[in-house]
């Protein structure tokens, strides 16, 4: 059997570090490194560090690509990292948990945990050799003493059918009559979108397989009964979070 070649990819948030991005990329023979930078470049104090990393990796013929996200938003970091892992699903993907902020570390670790298939996902922590008092062009630390591989402890995520329901609810939500500030979808419209019609059989199927599960254990929806003669389903904060982070599902 012919073995399929898998490229070595790394994902690294950019903070006030250079060595802890560059050295692991070189040592682990990375072919490409995605550098996560703050999307508001005017507020990003790490732009010079990103440029230094790119110069050093280019000198070693390692490709880089800047990826933008809000470093203050853990959910966005999780979503962006998850989408990169999905994009590189045919390759080996190593995730640097040390080179950015605590928000980056939390978001990246969460992203790893959401995958059912994760043999190709390798979170790691490059331990600094020496810590310094940083001020550009200095780094927070210099050298890498050791690269520690981090185990992935999977968190349970909703089944694909539930994720699809969350997307449909979000996409088709309208204002719910008499419920100020709340938007949602009629239960029968969700049944039509998922199963083709709103027959009694499909409404029962929707209740058993979708709404009951989204209500508990996921606590992702609120249900409003008999509003303008219809039952309505609305995403709450937890549902919005799940729909946002899990927008793109595993297909491999």
Image (cartoon, grey):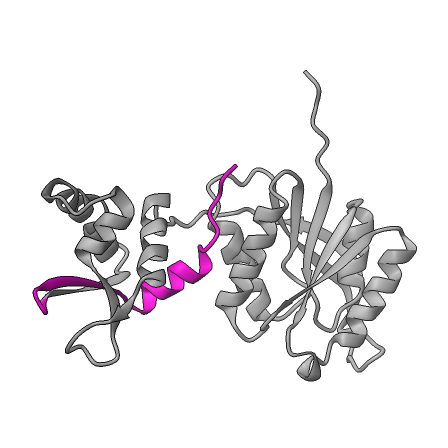
Q: For this view, does 162 lie left or right of residue 127?
A: left
**Is 80 placed above or below 45 here?**
above
Evaluate whether residue 216 shows in this view: no
- The magenta-colored residue range is 227-252
Of residues 14 and 27, the one nearer the viewer is 14
Q: Residue furthest top?
A: 1
Query: How far across and down, in percent of the image, does residue 108 sit?
Result: 56, 59
Query: How far across and down, in percent of the image, does residue 176 sit?
Result: 20, 72
Q: Residue furthest front?
A: 197
Q: Residue furthest right?
A: 59
Residue 71, image quadrant = bottom right
Kindly identify the residue that appears in the image at 48 percent across and 51 percent down. Answer: 248
Evaluate whether residue 108 shows in this view: yes
Query: How far across and down, in percent of the image, does residue 219 sit?
Result: 25, 60
Residue 178, image quadrant = bottom left
Of residues 90 and 217, the one nearer the viewer is 90
**Is 171 placed above or below 113 here?**
below
Kindly identify the residue that appears in the image at 60 percent across and 42 percent down. Answer: 89
Query: How far across and down, in percent of the image, does residue 63 sit?
Result: 81, 53
């Amino acid at each position: 059997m012919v073995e399929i070649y898998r490229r070595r990819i790394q994902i690294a948030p950019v903070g006030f570090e250079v060595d802890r991005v560059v050295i692991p990329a070189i040592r682990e023979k990375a072919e490409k490194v995605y550098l996560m930078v703050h999307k508001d470049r005017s507020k990003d104090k790490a732009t010079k560090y990103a440029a230094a990393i790119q110069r050093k990796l280019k000198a070693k013929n390692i490709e880089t690509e800047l990826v933008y996200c809000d470093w203050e938003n853990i959910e966005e970091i999780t979503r962006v990292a998850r989408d990169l892992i999905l994009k590189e699903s045919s390759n080996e993907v190593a995730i640097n948990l040390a080179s950015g902020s605590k928000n980056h570390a939390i978001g990246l670790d969460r992203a790893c945990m959401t995958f059912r298939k994760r043999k190709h996902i390798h979170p790691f922590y490059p331990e600094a050799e020496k810590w310094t008092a940083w001020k550009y062009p200095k780094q927070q630390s210099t050298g890498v003493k050791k690269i520690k591989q981090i185990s992935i402890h999977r968190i349970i995520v909703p089944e694909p059918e539930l994720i699809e329901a969350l997307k449909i609810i979000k996409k088709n939500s309208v204002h719910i009559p008499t419920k100020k500030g709340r938007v949602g979808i009629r239960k029968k419209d969700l049944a039509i979108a998922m199963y083709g019609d709103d027959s009694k059989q499909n409404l029962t199927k929707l209740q058993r397989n979708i709404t009951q599960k989204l209500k508990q254990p996921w606590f992702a929806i609120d249900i409003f009964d008999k509003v303008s003669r219809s039952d309505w389903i609305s995403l709450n904060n937890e549902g919005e979070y799940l729909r946002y982070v899990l927008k793109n599902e595993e297909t491999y």
